[in-house]
Amino acid sequence: MPAALSTLNATFRGKYRAAAFGIWGAVIAGAAAVGPLAGGFLTQDLSWHWIFLVNLPLCVIVVVGTFVFVAESKGSGFLPGFDVVGAVLSALGFGALIFAVIEGPAIGWWKPEGSFSLFGWHWPQDAAVSAVPVTFAIGSIALIAFVLWERSQALRGRSSILDLDLFRIPTFTLGNIVSVILNIGQMVMFFVLPLYLVNVLALDLIDSGLVLAAAGIGAFFAGAAARHFAAKFGDTGTVLIGFGVQVVAMLALAFWISDHTPIWQLGVSLAIYGLGLGLASALLTGTILEDTPVDASGQASATQSTLRQIGSALGTAIAGVALAMTLNSTLPAALEKTGLPDATAEQLADSTRESAGETITVLRGEGSSSQLGDDTSAAVDALEHGFADASRASMFISLGFLLLGFAAAVWLHLVARRRDAVIVNE
């Protein structure tokens, strides 16, 4: 990913640059939404093994196509050494923080709520604190050490995996902030919606993938047309428009989601969301790299790609935490109205939360032959309602990140306009 992006940055200039990054952004945004459709087809009609095997022929095609069509490009001014320490510190830091976010609901944010084991190392449930704050501390210390180490490497004239001087470029820094927030909000939505479609609306994997593909279709067409918007509104103006469209679509999703939402409403909202995603993603990458020196393209694109992936990982982690925590309240509240015994209701709520809703699908399939007997239908209705409420809350969380992204995009737009004004005056 970093090499492909830096090749684009080094190869395309002038009027072709916006088109190149527009196509790049459109493909990335569209693929992220179309992926569930392909995944649904492979897992439902073939085997889950194919989600890995499908990459083999695609990789062969890409390798051959690269040799045939892609011109060689190389950076310059390489410094001696390999930054092994920086790689280890960054992996430890980000890995520990994301681990803590994901495992917090299961093992406790401060007080241990369950034992934890990893590679023979055991954290007992009767410990003074949970493993989560300790992991947070380790991750934070590792990231601080990573920044200090990278600065030390630069001062000594040694190779570093992160060029901190890149963050002196305002559009690079702000653009990456916008990119991270965009990916967090996107992954929160794409993590929760498939679970909602399958477990609440009772869609199969293919149908749920088709619904989600609406966002991919919208993103692809918007990304391909983004350069025309850029010609009128500018790159950062188009990013801003894209975020605004996403906010409107997410607001509609957040209000429309229920245990009986019509499929067409979800499809329309997702298609509109995809249009905004395509506009924002298509030109955001080019904006981030626009003021970056060509010989720093590799570093800049690697940093941008890494931060994009960190945003996706954080978004997935936050989505899991948000869904689990909201299910803690919505499921018991919904089951309380069924008249089921407290022990049974508590067991159903725990099972549904821990299975991310799969319990609903299982009970629906068993019908009155389940262990709940004639109460199965009422229990399924209640669980669907509770899961829908939690899904709606997750959409509002995604909306919150999009609003943060919109604010950061406004700042980016103002900075870019000031830069353009200085260039014109000079």
Image: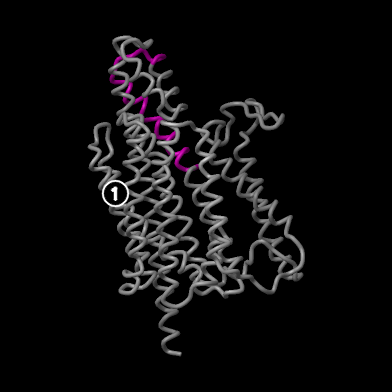
Which secondary structure type mostly characterizes the magenta part of the structure?
helix
Does 373 appear above or below 140? above
Q: Which residue is mark 1?
A: 251
The image position of residue 395, as x and y in percent, is 35, 44
Q: Does any portion of residue 274 appear in the rendered image?
A: yes
Q: How many marks?
A: 1
Viewer-closest of 349 and 423: 423
**Mark 1 nearby-residue class (10 Å; few <14, some 14–19, many ≥20):** some
Q: Residue furthest bottom?
A: 426
- Span shown in magenta: 317-344
Residue drawn 45% across and 27% down?
355
Does 31 appear above or below 283? above
Is residue 91 part of the magenta span, yes or no?
Answer: no
Q: Amino acid at mark 1?
A: Leu
Residue drawn 29% across and 50% down?
271
| Model colouring | one colour
The quarter of the picture where residue 415 lies is: bottom left
The image position of residue 182, as x and y in percent, is 43, 55
Secondary structure under the numbered disc 1 in the rendered image: helix
Residue drawn 48% across and 56% down?
180
Does 337 appear above or below 221? above
Does 369 appear above or below 216? above
Viewer-closest of 201 and 252: 201
Residue drawn 40% across and 31% down?
327
The image position of residue 166, as x and y in percent, is 58, 69
